[in-house]
Amino acid sequence: MLVIVAMRTKAQAQRVAELTGGKLVLKDNQPTCKVSLSGDFEQYREDVESVSVLFKLYDKAGKPVPSGWTLTGATFEVEWPKESPINSHFGARRFAYNWALVTVKSDMDAKKKDENYVSTQWTLAALRKRWNQEKDVVAPNSKECYASGIADLVQALSNWSQSKKGERKGKRVGFPKFASKRRDPGRVRFTTGAMRFEDDRRTIVLPNIGALGSKENTRWVQRHLAKNNARLLNCTLSERWGRLFISCQLAIRDKLASPTNQAPSKPITRAGVDLGLGSFVTVTDSNEDRIVFSNPAPLRASMAELKRTQKQLSRRIPRSHGYERAKTKLNRLYRKSTSMRRENVHQVTRCLVDTYGEIKIEDLNIAAMKQSMRRRAFRRSLADAGLGAFGPPLAYKAKRAKVKVVVVDRYFPSSQIHHNCTGKLTGAKLATRLTCDTCHVEVDRDENASFNIRDWSDIS
């Protein structure tokens, strides 16, 4: 039995080869990031994981094999300390970002004047090396805040380059702009240093910043880290709505990734899922059972209070006590709407994954839907429902629970075909009831669409 281990870097691959006695895979007589191991991989697992848990496994034919680890994340709100260098770290990240942008622009201008000019590559390693050579005396912040700013610019340049070449999907991305305190949200990412969750399950420690008190229990992360069933990869400290949050990325063992660790209650049942605005999700399964999840529409529910608070904020003197109170109230309303929308998505996706063995969903083009209806109220309702945030949580939860997810063709007219007679349905553009031209039967729009999505492979 032959197993190929793919590490992230050549140095890691070399280290794995030394510990396991494996052979480096060569390409054009040059070593690569892959190591060939003979026999069962479990006898080498401890040595490989001592180097890194971010590896991939392939069999002899080149097919992916589960590595035993899954990437996941968690976010905790922490208290603002009275005296801490947090704002200094945020400013240092912006400073490094702007310095790297100035360096790139000066290199581009010099290249136009002299074709033989050697410019710095747009990579994190190259820009960090130049930063270390040119930096003056800087604030006593963690080196991670400067590396975080440079890494963000490298990603922005990569997005711009790919978008310009037509290799990136979505809206066209422009050239990066300078970051300012007013426009750029405060954040910094830590990848090395003293990052840990304390045993009291209420404290998170970050490099140079120290201990931060969590407003919620960190038990589910701390207990896995304590038992060596998870590895802490990085932590991102960010400010949102005037509050402080820590988002951590973890590598956790597959057997612990799923919260339920149970098979679906209906493992052989197929379900069709239709997304909408009136009812958030309409589900029809192969047993002819139908479930409707309502749309909480949190933004619409708080719209009157939002307008009143925004009017109060506009009448206050900037940076006054009244201005800060109104701003805090406005942030609280926005935070509540976002949290309710996110919680609704997680509850619905968890219910679907725990119930059905196969789930069929539609592939919606949200941007095109917003453009087709130029009414501002419709675009606001579409954003308020959060339809675009439904697919990714369902995908990763289904993968962990080994539930099959089928994405229906984007151009399949699920709302225009009558499920019983395959006739064409007609009606107003946003009507909830449609009439069949063939059998003249009036049907519910969402219910009929869920039937068609469920039987998509048969109809198509």
Image (cartoon, rainbow, N blue to C red):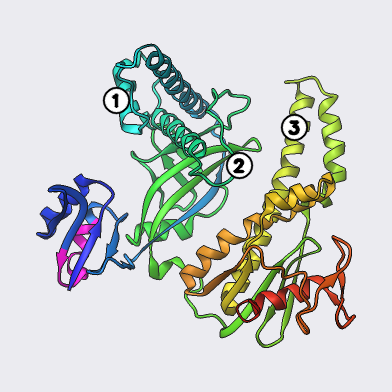
Q: Give residue 128's quadrant in the image.
A: top left
Residue 68 image point, x, y percent: 33, 66
Say what amino acid the circle numbered 3 marks.
Answer: Lys
Q: Give residue 256's quadrant in the image.
A: bottom left
Sequence-first tag of 1 and 3: 1
Q: Is 40 colored magenta in this rendering?
A: yes
Please identify, in this view, whether the residue under mark 2 or under mark 1 is nearer the observer. 2
Residue 321 image point, x, y percent: 76, 24
Say what amino acid the circle numbered 1 marks.
Answer: Lys
Q: Is 130 colored magenta in this rendering?
A: no
Q: Is residue 69 above or below residue 460?
A: above
Q: Is residue 243 above or below residue 39?
A: above
Say what amino acid the circle numbered 2 marks.
Answer: Lys
CA gap between label 2 and label 1 equals 33 Å
The answer to whether mark 3 and mark 2 are in CB contact below 8 A is no
Question: Mark 3 sits on what residue?
Answer: 327
CA gap between label 1 and label 3 equals 41 Å
Question: Mark 2 sits on what residue?
Answer: 171
> On residue 129, which mark appears?
1
